[in-house]
C-alpha cells in the first residue's frame, strides 16, 4: 500500500468545485545502509513503483495506491501509511508507519546484488513544527489543483520536535558473506532497534511563477538523543554514541489549467547514527506524479 495522505482540517466541503479525481504514479525507496571502515552495504526494496487513484477536496485528500510487481518471486512485502496535517495555520504535523519484508542487498565489493527475504524493517515516527507566522498556503489545495495564494513569494520558519522508532532484523547475520569471514564476532549484526526524540527547525516556502505554475520547498533538519540496542548472533551491546542527525526535505511543482492539473513532487527523509563500528543511515524517498480532473469548473 502506498501513502495515505490527509492534510489540513477534516471538515466536510459541500462545494463541488473544490473536488477532484486523481490518477497518480509514485516511486518509493525505503532503504538503509551500514558503513564500515573497509566496506559499505546497502539494503533496498524491490517493486518500488505504485499506481493509484484518489479523491481530493479543499480540506482533505485520500490516495490509495497498488504496488506494481513484475511476477518475480523476489518481491518486497510492505505496508506504508503516511499522513500530514496543518492545524490552525501554525501547526504542521507529519506521521508515518511502515513495515517492509524482503530487501535487495548491495555492496561496494563488486558482488552481484542478493535478495534477502529474511531482512525486515519497521519504522514509526512523527514530526511537529510550530511556525513563526501563519502558513498562508495549503498543501491540500496545491496537491488538489486548487491553490490560493495572497502573494507571489511566501517564506516562513519554525521550531518543533520529532520522535522515531526504527528496527531491522535478519534470521542470521545481516551482513553479506563476502565480508563475514573477515569480521570479528562482535561485528556480525542480527538485529537493531532504536528510539529517539529530539528537536528540529524548519523552513517552508512557496513561489508563484508565470503560466499557473507554483513551486514549494521545505527543509527540516533536526538532532535527537537515541536509545539504541544492537543484537549480534551470540551477544548484544548498546552503542555509546547517543546522537541521531536527520534532514527532511521536499520539492513540489503544480500546474493548473481549467479543470485539469498536474503535480510533481519529491520528498526525502534521511537520518544517521553510529553503531560503534558502523555508521547506520536510513533513507525514505518518494517521487510522485499526479494528474487530476476537477469535478466542476
Image (cartoon, rainbow, N blue to C red):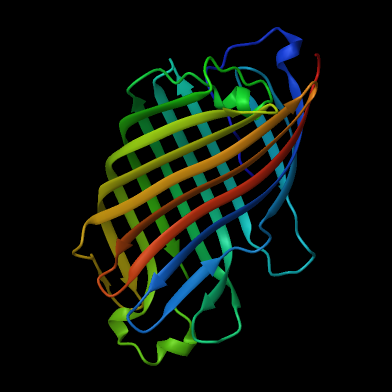
66 vs 236: above or below: above
Q: Relative to the observer, which residue lies in front, 204 or 196? A: 204
**Residue 277 seen in this snapshot:** yes
Q: How many labels does the image show?
A: 0
Expressed as whole percent of the image width and height from the top left, the position of residue 3 reads 61, 41
Farthest top residue in view: 14
Farthest bottom residue in view: 181
Query: In the rendered image, which quarter is residue 110 located in?
Result: bottom right
Expressed as whole percent of the image width and height from the top left, the position of residue 52 reads 75, 41
Farthest left residue in view: 240
122 vs 277: above or below: above
| Left or right of residue 66: residue 126 | left
| Left or right of residue 285: residue 132 | left
Query: In the rendered image, which quarter is residue 127 located in?
Result: top left
Q: Could you tell me which residue is drawn at 56 percent across and 86 percent down?
A: 111
| Left or right of residue 240: residue 250 | right
Farthest front residue in view: 210
Q: Relative to the observer, which residue lies in front, 226 or 145? A: 145
Q: Could you tell me which residue is drawn at 63 percent across and 11 percent down?
A: 12
Q: In which quarter of the image is the C terminus?
A: top right
**Residue 171 seen in this snapshot:** no
Q: Could you tell me which residue is drawn at 56 percent across and 65 percent down?
A: 44
Expressed as whole percent of the image width and height from the top left, the position of residue 93 reads 43, 30
Expressed as whole percent of the image width and height from the top left, the position of residue 176 reads 48, 82
Q: Relative to the observer, which residue lies in front, 224 or 205? A: 205
Amino acid at each position: 500500500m502506498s501513502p495515505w495522505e490527509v492534510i489540513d482540517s477534516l471538515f466536510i466541503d459541500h462545494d463541488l468545485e473544490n473536488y477532484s479525481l486523481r490518477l497518480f504514479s509514485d516511486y518509493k525507496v525505503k532503504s538503509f545502509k551500514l558503513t564500515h571502515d573497509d566496506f559499505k552495504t546497502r539494503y533496498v526494496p524491490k517493486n518500488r513503483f505504485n499506481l493509484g487513484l484518489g479523491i481530493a477536496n479543499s480540506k482533505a485528500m485520500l490516495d490509495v495506491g497498488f504496488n506494481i510487481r513484475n511476477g518475480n518471486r523476489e518481491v518486497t512485502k510492505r505496508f506504508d501509511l503516511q499522513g500530514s496535517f496543518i492545524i490552525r495555520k501554525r501547526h504542521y504535523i507529519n506521521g508515518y508507519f511502515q513495515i517492509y519484508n524482503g530487501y535487495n542487498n548491495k555492496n561496494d565489493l563488486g558482488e552481484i546484488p542478493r535478495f534477502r527475504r529474511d531482512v525486515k524493517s519497521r519504522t514509526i515516527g512523527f514530526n511537529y513544527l510550530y511556525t513563526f507566522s501563519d502558513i498562508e498556503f495549503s498543501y491540500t489545495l496545491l496537491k488538489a489543483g486548487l491553490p490560493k495564494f495572497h502573494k507571489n513569494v511566501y517564506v516562513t520558519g519554525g521550531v518543533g520536535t520529532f520522535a522515531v522508532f526504527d528496527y531491522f532484523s535478519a534470521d542470521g547475520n545481516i551482513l553479506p558473506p563476502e565480508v563475514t569471514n573477515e569480521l570479528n564476532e562482535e561485528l556480525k549484526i542480527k538485529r537493531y532497534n532504536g528510539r529517539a526524540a529530539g528537536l528540529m527547525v524548519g523552513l517552508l516556502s512557496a513561489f508563484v511563477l508565470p503560466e499557473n505554475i507554483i513551486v514549494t520547498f521545505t527543509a527540516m533538519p533536526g538532532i535527537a538523543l537515541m536509545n539504541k540496542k544492537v543484537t549480534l548472533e551470540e551477544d548484544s551491546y548498546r552503542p555509546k554514541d547517543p546522537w541521531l542527525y536527520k534532514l527532511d526535505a521536499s520539492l513540489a511543482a503544480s500546474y493548473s489549467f481549467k479543470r485539469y492539473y498536474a503535480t510533481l513532487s519529491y520528498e526525502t527523509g534521511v537520518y544517521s547514527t553510529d553503531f560503534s563500528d558502523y555508521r547506520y543511515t536510513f533513507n525514505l524517498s518518494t517521487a510522485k506524479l499526479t494528474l487530476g480532473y476537477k469535478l466542476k469548473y
